[in-house]
Image: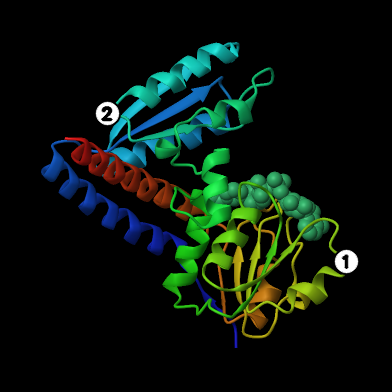
């Protein structure tokens, strides 16, 4: 039987509606709506669209928008000064530095300067360390979106075999750690993994984040598995995932499409992170009074 298609657009819309309600409640309670600061350096059209979408989404849920656009030839110190100002501004709950930054700037070093309590992308070394240690902190948005989709399907993760393909700091590693936190038995595959189909086919849950269109086919999928395709690849046939959808859908019990699967979840989870950051900052302020 063909797989159920997991509707990321619907799950993302539900998360955004919940966030909007909670933003309004926080605003009423504290007199302050959460604020999201976006930092865009240079004029890359793709990055500009991503930032515009995030700003629009944050305004739609009632958050305040603080946008900083620096020229492509901005010096490292210029970007550092903007991040420092956002760190110090009590109206800014979350900071998003759009990556990649132009050549000549040190992206990882800039990211590391974001205050951990405002790190709504969850990409600073401190947030990464907290995730590794299982202590509270902000987690990266796309991996959170993967977990939200699995939860929306009611997938029982405890004790399940979860196979993740791709080991980036942005997706693969944090997804693996989040699955481990939920007591799945996790196998993390990468470009040097031997006999990938034999490893993948063990997964009750298979998460793929590689960036290689159609890499994963039916032979990688355990019958009845839940398949989450994080890949977004621009091909002559349009946007495609890392999973060869038609074949995999014949074996899986549920599968995300591309587009319309994980993609819409990233902004939704970024908004949820910004709300969580604002709640924690409001609680810290109350505790100091
Ligand atoms: P990356 O290039 O940083 O990492 C790719 C990973 O895939 C590496 O760890 C590498 O070891 C592994 N890999 C490469 N070839 C492989 C092979 N043949 N077999 C097994 N593993 C292999 O990529 P990334 O930033 O993690 O992004 C992965 C994909 O997810 C991309 O298509 C990207 O566009 C997409 N993505 C989507 C979202 C979203 O939906 N919002 C967010 C982030 C990334």
In the rendered image, the quadrant that contains the N terminus is: bottom right
Does residue 4 show up? yes
Mark 2 close to ligand 1, CB under 8 Å: no
Q: Nearer the viewer, residue 6 or 192?
A: 192
Q: Residue furthest bottom?
A: 1
**Residue 163 percent location from the top left of the image:** 68, 70
Q: Secondary structure at mark 2?
A: loop
**Residue 18 percent location from the top left of the image:** 27, 57
Q: Residue furthest front?
A: 288
**Pointer 2: residues within 10 angstroms few (<14), some, or many (20+)?**
some
170 w.r.t. 33: above or below: below
Mark 1 close to ligand 1, CB under 8 Å: no
Q: Nearer the viewer, residue 176 or 136?
A: 136
Q: Earlier in the sequence, mark 2 or mark 1?
A: 2
For residue 173, side relative to residue 12 (left or right): right
Query: In the rendered image, which residue does mark 1 sit on?
Result: 194
130 w.r.t. 110: above or below: below
In the rendered image, the quadrant that contains the C terminus is: top left
Q: Nearer the viewer, residue 50 or 156?
A: 156
The residue at 86%/57% (across/down) is 192
Residue 91 tag number: 2
Q: Secondary structure at mark 1?
A: loop
């Amino acid at each position: 039987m063909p797989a159920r298609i997991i509707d990321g657009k619907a799950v993302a819309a539900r998360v955004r509606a919940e966030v909007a309600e909670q933003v309004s409640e926080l605003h009423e309670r504290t007199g302050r709506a959460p604020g999201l600061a976006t930092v865009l350096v240079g004029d890359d059209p793709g990055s500009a669209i991503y930032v515009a979408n995030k700003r629009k989404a944050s305004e739609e849920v009632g958050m305040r928008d603080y946008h900083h656009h620096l020229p492509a030839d901005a010096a490292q110190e210029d970007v550092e000064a903007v991040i420092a100002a956002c760190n110090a501004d009590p109206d800014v709950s979350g900071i998003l530095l759009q990556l990649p930054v132009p050549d000549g700037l040190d992206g990882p070093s800039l990211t590391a300067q974001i205050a951990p309590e405002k790190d709504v992308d969850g990409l600073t070394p401190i947030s990464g360390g907290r995730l590794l240690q299982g202590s509270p902190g902000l987690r990266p948005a796309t991996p959170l979106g993967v977990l939200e989709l699995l939860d929306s399907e009611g997938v029982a993760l405890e004790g399940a075999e979860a196979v993740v393909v791709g080991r980036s700091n942005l997706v693969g590693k944090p997804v693996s750690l989040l699955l481990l936190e939920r007591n799945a038995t996790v196998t993390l595959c990468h470009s040097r993994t031997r006999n990938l189909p034999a490893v993948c086919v063990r997964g009750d849950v298979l998460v793929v984040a590689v960036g290689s269109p159609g890499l994963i086919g039916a032979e990688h999928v355990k019958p009845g598995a839940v398949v989450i395709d994080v890949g977004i690849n621009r091909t002559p046939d349009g946007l495609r995932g890392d999973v060869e959808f038609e074949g995999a859908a014949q074996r899986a019990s549920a599968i995300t499409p591309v587009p319309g699967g994980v993609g819409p979840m990233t902004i939704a989870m970024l908004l949820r992170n910004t709300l969580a950051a604002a709640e924690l900052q409001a609680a810290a302020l109350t505790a100091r009074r």
